[in-house]
Image (cartoon, rainbow, N blue to C red):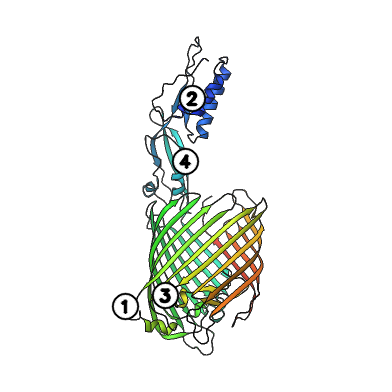
Amino acid sequence: MLGIQHDFDDPTSLVYGNGVQAILNRNIGGTVTLRRLNQMSRDIISYYRKCGQPVVDVVIPEQKITSGVVQIVVTESRIGSVKITDGCHFEAEDLCRWVECTRRGDKIYESKLNNDLFWLNQNPFRRVSVDMRPGATDGTTDVIFDIDDVCPIRGYTGYEDTGVRTLGLERLYAGMIYGNAFGKGGILSYQYTADAEFYRLNAHSVSYAQPVNRSYSWNAYGSWAGVSPTIPTINQDGESWQVGLGITHHLQKTQWVDTNWSIGADFKQTNNNLEFGGQQVQNSAADFLQLRLSFQHLRRGCRDEYGLLTLDSYVGPGSGFTSDHNTAAFNTIRANTTPDYFYTRLRAERMWNVREDWQLMGRFVGQLASERLLFSETLGFGGYDSIRGYDQRVYSGDDGWFASLEFGPRTKRFGCCSDPNTFRAFTFLDMGGGSVQDALPGEVSDEFLISAGLGMRLAISDRISMRASYGHGFESVPGAESRDRVHIGIVSLFGPRVR
């Protein structure tokens, strides 16, 4: 072959790129043989696939090669049609809104196919794959998204020791998840929670999350809890309930990055502080309304690495929404509190792989408030999710922070490769400090806690998840019965799942 001559309609084609040029240049000056021509065709196809264009046809038509000129026909296939097959429980008509990158007449790019597949597979009760078939006209390929789905109902039961001593430490819960509410792919969930005796605490919660499009989703939730404390001086039951609504704007959502902000509002009513470690039940209730603005950024890395940053800000817009939404009602629950407040809470979490065989996880949570808050809005210290070794909510602060470090071998995967079990063991160090604004007599104005211990997390497929940790607290806390604790949690899921 003596040289290269192009005759291609699309100036953006890879034919004009350095990669194809390099493949052809390697063969200029060489002897024209069938083996060399076939290898050159394979190299061009391989290069196209490497560049994310998986459907290309390279043909060397029948020709007379007498002057050292070889004609090579490269056909970059274009999309003839895009189809979505109906599933047993999810309809193609509803899923069409998630296909934005794969368009008729466009070239076929692997990155665009994967982008559409990512959004189509957001629902846990369906698995969408892509198939490609020859189109009705030459040079076209039909793209078919195939749905493999299951009945979108799943149940779960669980146990954990996240309670406070006045309502019992043990918690039992069970719930149901329906994954195609109103035929629009919304997730409707219900959970019942109780203490081990089904007497001190009975709580019901329901939530609904509905994706609208790639940019927006919304969610609504509500809960009710009735409590019967085991305190000799209290013979009255407590009651709390809340409802909320939120709208989320997704700034970026991919396999590796999820960034969003959201706004919402919560309305709550309570006549006690028992669920948050207190010992008060009042004859009257307090209502409060708060507005919420949140930001979240999640970045996933390779081999379990990730980084998470969330910032939540809450505003109490003042009194007057209901007859019990005022300073007097607030003071029956906690003295010197008002419906006019502001606080913000920051959470940062990061997992690192240390060399080849170890992992380090760090977590930080901090809160700043403008004034004294109701107990449900304070930052709680103690428990498996803050400072282990202490009971849940052994101390609550208007302002405060806590940090955790976990270090251990990398997560071990075993069992079936397509459905693995995972196990992780670690040592940990937790510490934090909190303060109460304008502390009253009998209140601890500030507290510092620190603990260390061992822990593990085990997942058997996606059916059973278990966590366990033992922590020893190095600082005594007034009123705390123990600073040596085992924290346990286990949840079992049942119901159909997509393979």
Residue placed farthest to the top in the image? Answer: 66
- Crowd band around label 2 with a 10 angstrom C-alpha radius: few (<14), some (14–19), many (20+): some
Return the disc, 1 or 4, that comes first in the chain's sequence: 4
Return the disc, 3 or 1, that comes first in the chain's sequence: 3
Nearer to the camera, 485 or 346 = 346
Return the disc, 3 or 2, that comes first in the chain's sequence: 2
Q: Residue at x 59, y 82 (%)?
A: 478
Return the disc, 3 or 4, that comes first in the chain's sequence: 4
Which is more foreground, mark 1 or mark 4? Answer: 1
Residue 108 percent location from the top left of the image:
44, 35
The reply to whether the C-beta atoms of the residues labelled 3 and 1 are less than 8 Å apart is no
Which secondary structure, mark 4? helix
Q: What is the number of the mark on residue 412?
A: none
- Crowd band around label 1 with a 10 angstrom C-alpha radius: few (<14), some (14–19), many (20+): some
Disc 3 residue type (three-letter): Trp
From the image, tell me which residue sits under label 2: 58
The reply to whether the C-beta atoms of the residues labelled 1 and 4 are less than 8 Å apart is no
The reply to whether the C-beta atoms of the residues labelled 3 and 2 are less than 8 Å apart is no
Q: CA distance from mark 4 to mark 2?
A: 22 Å
The reply to whether the C-beta atoms of the residues labelled 1 and 2 are less than 8 Å apart is no
From the image, tell me which residue sits under label 1: 320
Q: CA distance from mark 1 to mark 4?
A: 53 Å
Return the disc, 4 or 2, that comes first in the chain's sequence: 2
Please determine whether, in this image, residue 414 is positioned above or below residue 169. Answer: above
From the image, tell me which residue sits under label 4: 111
Please determine whether, in this image, residue 248 is positioned above or below residue 274. Answer: above
Which secondary structure, mark 1? loop
Residue 105 percent location from the top left of the image:
37, 34
From the image, tell me which residue sits under label 3: 241
Q: CA distance from mark 3 to mark 1?
A: 19 Å
Disc 1 residue type (three-letter): Gly
